[in-house]
Image: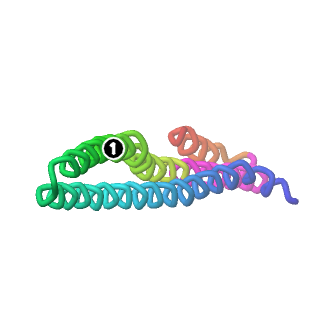
């Protein structure tokens, strides 16, 4: 490894970390959203079942009618819990994961700006060193390069 490679390694690790988070959080968000949609569809199907049991109960004898209505009521209560699960997952899991997409994009932009500034500074330091070696007595050019370098910081 060259010294420059060693200097770039932390940036590469940061870029890899941002890419890794971006990939996996995106996948997690999609899978959780699909899970929530499927749970909501299951709730919808159960509601249809409750309605059908109630329709059937209306055509039966009083004892069976009461039993079917009790069953339908209890099954409907279960669907209320399923609805709460859907809402909770949406609010507590899916929405925060969606927010990470924006955060990761901002971090990637920050990292890119930092790397650009660092590379620009390294080029100017290299230019300064070459100027010092070629013309050690030419202070005007050296001062101009230093002024540009410090304006970046």
Residue found 79% across the figure and 57% down from its top: 5
Based on the picture, tell me whether residue 118 belongs to the magenta stretch: yes
x and y, in percent, of residue 96 in the image: 41, 43
Q: Along the horizontal axis of the image, is 31 left or right of 137?
A: left
Q: Which quadrant, please, contains the N terminus?
A: bottom right
Q: Secondary structure at mark 1?
A: helix
Q: Is residue 34 above or below residue 150?
A: below
Taking the view exactly as shown, the residue that stands out farthest to the left is 58
Residue found 64% across the figure and 49% down from its top: 14
Q: Which residues are magenta?
A: 112-136
Is residue 145 visible in this depiction of the protein?
A: yes
Q: Nearer the viewer, residue 129 or 46?
A: 46
x and y, in percent, of residue 101 in the image: 43, 52
Q: Nearer the viewer, residue 41 or 63?
A: 63
> Which class describes the residues within 10 Å of circle 1: few (<14), some (14-19), or many (20+)?
some
Q: Which quadrant, please, contains the C terminus?
A: top right
Q: Along the horizontal axis of the image, is 8 left or right of 153?
A: right
Residue under label 1, please give it.
78
Residue found 22% across the figure and 60% down from its top: 48
Asked where in the image residue 61 lies, by quadrant, the reply is: bottom left
Q: Nearer the viewer, residue 129 or 52?
A: 52
x and y, in percent, of residue 151 in the image: 50, 40
Asked where in the image residue 56 lies, by quadrant, the reply is: bottom left
Q: Along the horizontal axis of the image, is 144 left or right of 65?
A: right
Q: Is residue 110 above or below residue 48?
A: above
The colour scheme applied to this rendered structure is rainbow
Residue found 57% across the figure and 52% down from its top: 21
Q: Along the horizontal axis of the image, is 133 left or right of 147?
A: right
x and y, in percent, of residue 149 in the image: 58, 43
* Magenta stretch, main secondary structure class: helix
């Amino acid at each position: 490894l060259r010294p420059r490679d060693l200097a770039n390694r932390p940036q590469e690790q940061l870029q890899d970390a941002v890419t890794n988070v971006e990939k996996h959080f995106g996948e997690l968000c999609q899978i959780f959203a699909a899970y929530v949609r499927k749970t909501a569809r299951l709730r919808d199907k159960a509601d249809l079942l409750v309605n059908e049991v109630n329709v059937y109960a209306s055509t039966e004898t009083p004892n069976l009618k009461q039993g079917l209505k009790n069953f339908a009521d209890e099954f409907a209560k279960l669907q209320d819990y399923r609805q709460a699960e859907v809402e909770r997952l949406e609010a507590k899991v899916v929405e925060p994961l969606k927010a990470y997409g924006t955060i990761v994009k901002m971090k990637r932009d920050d990292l890119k700006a930092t790397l650009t500034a660092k590379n620009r500074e390294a080029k100017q330091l290299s230019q300064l060193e070459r100027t010092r070696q070629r013309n050690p007595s030419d202070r005007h050019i050296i001062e101009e390069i230093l002024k540009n370098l410090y304006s970046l910081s």
